[in-house]
Amino acid sequence: MNQIENPFLQHLQELQDIKFMIAADTDYRLAYQNFRIFDIQIDALTINLIAEYQHYKTDNEMATIARLIVEKYRL
């Protein structure tokens, strides 16, 4: 992955990457309309991707974080 110099843009890129990984891990059962910039909206449930990423990022790679989110919320 190319490094983006602006930290804000880097974080946005990481969130975008994790959304694609989550979609793939759910076999694309989630429509992209469920994905907002910083969260995933499913009916009354809102999954805060920033909080989830912050929680798991120390010990896990992006693909693992995506899988953990899918498992946690049974997506």
Image (cartoon, rainbow, N blue to C red):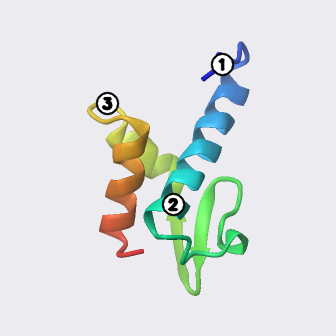
Q: Secondary structure at mark 1?
A: loop
Q: Residue at x 66, y 35 (%)?
A: 13
- CB-based contact (under 8 Å), mark 2 and mark 3: no
Residue type pointed to by label 2:
Ala
Judge from the rendering whether residue 4 lies leftward or rightward of residue 47; answer left or right.
right
Eyeballing the image, is 14 above or below 46? above
* Number of numbered discs overlaid on the protein picture: 3
Eyeballing the image, is 39 above or below 54? below
Crowd tier of the residue under label 1, counting other residues whose Cα lies within 10 Å: few below 14, some 14–19, many 20 or above: few
Residue that mark 2 sits on: 24
Q: Position of residue 7 (x, y in %)?
A: 66, 21
Q: CA distance from mark 1 to mark 3?
A: 21 Å
Q: Position of residue 59 (x, y in %)?
A: 26, 32
Eyeballing the image, is 20 above or below 6? below
Residue that mark 3 sits on: 58
Residue type pointed to by label 3:
Thr
Eyeballing the image, is 40 above or below 68? below
Residue type pointed to by label 1:
Asn
Residue that mark 1 sits on: 2
Of residues 67 and 54, which is closer to you in this image? 67
Mark 1 or 3, nearer chain start: 1
- Give the image quarter of residue 75: bottom left
